[in-house]
Amino acid sequence: MKIEAFRLERFYSRFEFTTQYLLCSSDCEAMHIHDLLSLEEGAHVKFMKQWLGYTETLGSHKLREEITKLYSSASPAQVLVFSGAEEPIFLLWHALLEAEDEVIVQFPCYQSAASVPESIGCKVKPWRARFENGAPFFDISELRRLISPKTRAVYINSPHNPTGYHFDERQYTEIVSLCQSAGAVLISDEVYRELELDPSSRLPAIVDVYEKGVSIGVMSKAYGLAGLRIGWLASKDDTLLRHCAMLKEYTTICNAAPSEFLAEVALRNRHHLLNRNLDIIRHNLPLLNDFFSRFPDIFHWHCPSAGSIGFAKWKLDLDGMALAEDIVKKKNVLILPGEVYDEPGFFRVGFGRRNMPEALGRFEEYVMEELISKHR
Ligand SMILES: Cc1ncc(COP(=O)(O)O)c(C=O)c1O
């Protein structure tokens, strides 16, 4: 299989563990195992007694039961557990697609959504974001133009990586009805779901509203537990689920037993984790808004209403990659250049981490010292 290098992961692998301040992380603040176990009486002791044999390929029944509480209509048999969200994206595309199939993917995107179908030999039609003064927008009439009975699947992600865009209920319903008319599978990457600042803007999970809908979820983002490497998909299509489970026997076979146990504890206490992470976001966002408003000649910024990331635009004509490297060198701060998404001129900002204010402070120093004083 020939597959394009994952540009975002290539970039991260150079800087993530050597740069002190990450101003672009998409995952919310993590925690120690000790603190997670403290959320539940008796969990420490049970964790110590966790058996370290192989686990069920589908994911433990108890974990799948906890996962179904995120949905209104899915049963444990309709949930499959994987390593992160990356594995189900990869396997789902392989289970669904054959060469020459046509799919539609929101662009820019988390790259595996597009590169995996491309590697299978499929035609990937981009549903592109439009930007007006830096504010992202996905036009439903554009999707209407792209979709046809030839469309095998549509891949959406809301809240969206990297733009922070979040569909409203009307748009969401239209997307579902377009897929229904075309007979297309609708894959909804819901890894940032439950991070809506206004809970009334939370969209129903796709598995609950469309018979051909597949929801992808993960512990990494809203719950801040990326190190568990636990993700899942939920679908009402038994054949598709069986196919994905069969393919998993060629990748990870089953999940790590300690991670399954910890994910179960975390999901039982998910409101506690979500409140903690939303508090961090509510603290960080006004600081970002204030920062960007003080440099109107340098940035376009549109404050997202959900999720943990936003996409800022440079008003200056710069080499985004070289600039990001220079910021690491001079200030030990990492931003994610839009180049990794094929969107030069933009950069991704993450605001779900506790040390974001310090990271932003150092970024501001860079802006003042290198961009304002030198270009004046
Ligand atoms: C939209 C989206 N989907 C899937 C993933 C993969 O999640 P994980 O790294 O937990 O496997 C990410 C990670 O950044 C993402 O942003």
Image (spheres, rainbow, N blue to C red):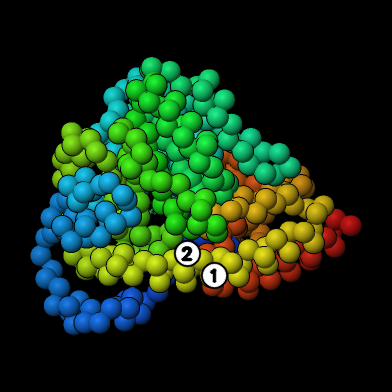
Q: Count neighbours of disc 1 (C-alpha within 10 A) and say few if under 14, some if 14 to 19, many if 20 or more.
A: many
- In x, y percent, where is residue 185? 34, 30
Q: Count neighbours of disc 2 (C-alpha within 10 A) and say few if under 14, some if 14 to 19, many if 20 or more.
A: many
Is 245 on the left-hand or right-hand side of 153?
Answer: left
Q: Is mark 2 within 8 Å of ligand 1?
A: no
The foreground one among 282 and 114 is: 282
Q: How many marks?
A: 2
Q: Amino acid at mark 1?
A: Ile
Query: Which quadrant does the N terminus fall into?
Result: top left
The residue depicted at 79 percent of the width and 66 percent of the height is: 369
- In x, y percent, where is residue 166? 54, 46
- In x, y percent, where is residue 357? 63, 71
Q: Is any atom of residue 83 visible in this view?
A: no
The residue depicted at 47 percent of the width and 51 percent of the height is: 202
The foreground one among 157 and 21 is: 157
Q: Which mark is residue 280?
A: 1
Work out how far the residue at label 1 is from the one at label 2, CA to CA, in angstroms.
Answer: 9 Å
Q: Which mark is residue 78?
A: none
Contact between labelled residues 2 and 1, with CB atoms less than 8 Å apart: yes
Q: Residue furthest top?
A: 149
Q: Residue furthest right?
A: 376
The foreground one among 189 and 5 is: 189
Dot 1: what SS? helix
Query: Which quadrant does the C terminus fall into?
Result: bottom right
Q: Which residue is mark 2?
A: 28
Q: Quadrant of residue 363?
A: bottom right
- In x, y percent, where is residue 20? 55, 71
Q: Is any atom of residue 245 visible in this view?
A: yes
Dot 2: what SS? loop
The residue depicted at 46 percent of the width and 22 percent of the height is: 147
